[in-house]
Image: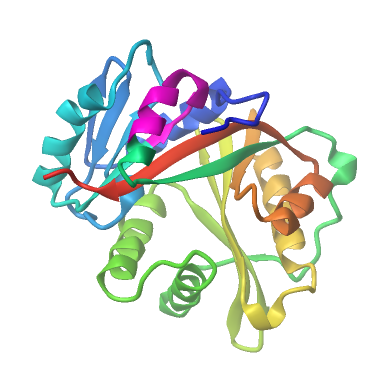
Amino acid sequence: MRIDSPAVTAPPPVLRFWRALDERLATVRPTRWGAVVTDARFPLIWDANYARLDADLTGLTVAEVERELVPTLRTAGAEIEHVVVFDPEAATGVLTELSTRGHRLSWDLVMAWDGRAAQLPRATERVRPIALGEAAWRDIRASLTGPFGIEEGEPIEQMMRLEREVLAPAGKRWFGIRHDDRWVSVAAAFVLDAVAYVDNVATDEAFRGRGYATEITAAIVDHALREGVETVFLLADPEDRGAVGIYERLGFREVARLASTRGPLPR
């Protein structure tokens, strides 16, 4: 396993946001290395049922993580063992062992806006806040099953319940661009503890290449700045150079990489 980022530890504002987000879920059990987070309402949602490795990772082993994680996941009805690591260099052994076991290892770029407002394009009237009625939720649902690959059936139903019952009441706000009678490009802004997260940026395939994602992301940054946030950040797939390029042109810069693994629960 190779860690090729010079900045691998997520900065404090990102950690603060992530911990605050987890507190909106049902159960957070602190450990010396981070926390086990579960929510039995959403057992098929990996990010609602996982181990967060963000504290003391000295000498940490998979066995130590699983002693806390696996029984709790089983109680919640989760079927996937999911681990998110905020300092990959400090948990190389854990990541290597889980990868060797056959768990999928993936990376996210943590990109933070660098504060140069001149890089933001002027907001246009095309980008509007989304009033979350039934029609809007249908369009948001379609955006999640497309670019983000969430499976039809119970997985997407649980994701939509999470969005509607937990995240929207906690302050997650959606913005979009309409064409005819539907939202064809959407993204969300979530502000917690003076940190803004840009989430779920997606455009219908038939409407890509028109700059919609750029416009919406810029509008969300502008919205967050007017809210007085300390940091605006997002996660990006390091292999998606097109999306990374869009964010870089808007003034986002890589500040860290997160590693995560996903595989079946051990028997």
Q: How far across and down, in percent of the image, does residue 227 sit?
A: 64, 39
Whether residue 193 appears in this view of the structure is no
Split into 4 quadrants, where in the image is the C terminus? top left
Colour convention: rainbow
Q: Is residue 250 above or below residue 2?
A: below
Q: How far across and down, in percent of the image, does residue 134 sit?
A: 41, 77
The residue sitting at 76% across, 61% down in the picture is: 215
Whether residue 137 appears in this view of the structure is yes
The residue sitting at 65% across, 52% down in the picture is: 239
Q: How far across and down, in percent of the image, does residue 147 sit?
A: 54, 68
Q: Is residue 49 above or below residue 158?
A: above
The overriding secondary structure of the stretch rendered in magenta is: helix
Is residue 76 magenta-colored?
Answer: no
Is residue 95 magenta-colored?
Answer: yes
Would residue 48 appear left or right of 147 to someone viewing this image? Answer: left
The residue sitting at 40% across, 32% down in the picture is: 95
Which segment did they paint magenta? 84-97
Q: How far across and down, in percent of the image, does residue 153 sit?
A: 28, 75
